[in-house]
Image: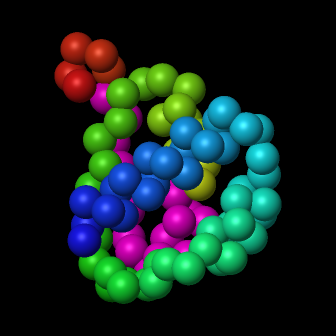
Amino acid sequence: MLVVAVALLCMVGLIVSACAITPEEMRSEMEKANIDWRSCAGQTITVNLSRIPHAEAMVDLITEFEQLTGLRVNFEILSDEEY
């Protein structure tokens, strides 16, 4: 289930960076989806990201993602050599 949460976080970052929609618009669309976003509430996931624009877009959305899902997200942005 946590793999799904990580995949969703990645998807959100990619969509936002590609479509240039606001976090509020993304949250509205996510709330319309037929998904139990809080099925993993209370758990923590760790995300390692490469230093690319998509990662920056995802970091900007972590608070929104945590509020929507109830997950806590720990993240680290790594250099290409570390990743």
User: Quarter-wise, where is residue 8 in the image?
Assistant: bottom left
Does residue 52 appear left or right of residue 27 in this picture? left
Tell me what residue is drawn at x 23 percent, y 25 percent. 83
Find out whether residue 64 is within the magenta segment.
Answer: yes
Can you give x and y, in whole percent of width and height, for residue 15 in the image? 61, 43
In this view, 12 is above or below 43:
above
- Looking at the image, can residue 20 be seen? yes
Q: Residue furthest front?
A: 34
Tell me what residue is drawn at x 49 percent, y 48 percent. 11
Q: Using the image as rendered, state which of residue 7 and residue 59 is in the foreground.
A: 7
Q: Using the image as rendered, state which of residue 75 and residue 28 is in the foreground.
A: 28
Tell me what residue is drawn at x 36 percent, y 28 percent. 50
Q: Which residues are magenta?
A: 62-78
In this view, 4 is above or below 69:
above
Does residue 6 appear left or right of residue 1 in this picture? right
Tell me what residue is drawn at x 53 percent, y 66 percent. 65
Does residue 36 appear left or right of residue 43 in this picture? right
Q: Residue furthest top?
A: 81
User: Quarter-wise, where is residue 80 in the image?
Assistant: top left
**The N terminus: image quadrant:** bottom left
User: Quarter-wise, where is residue 9 in the image?
Assistant: bottom left
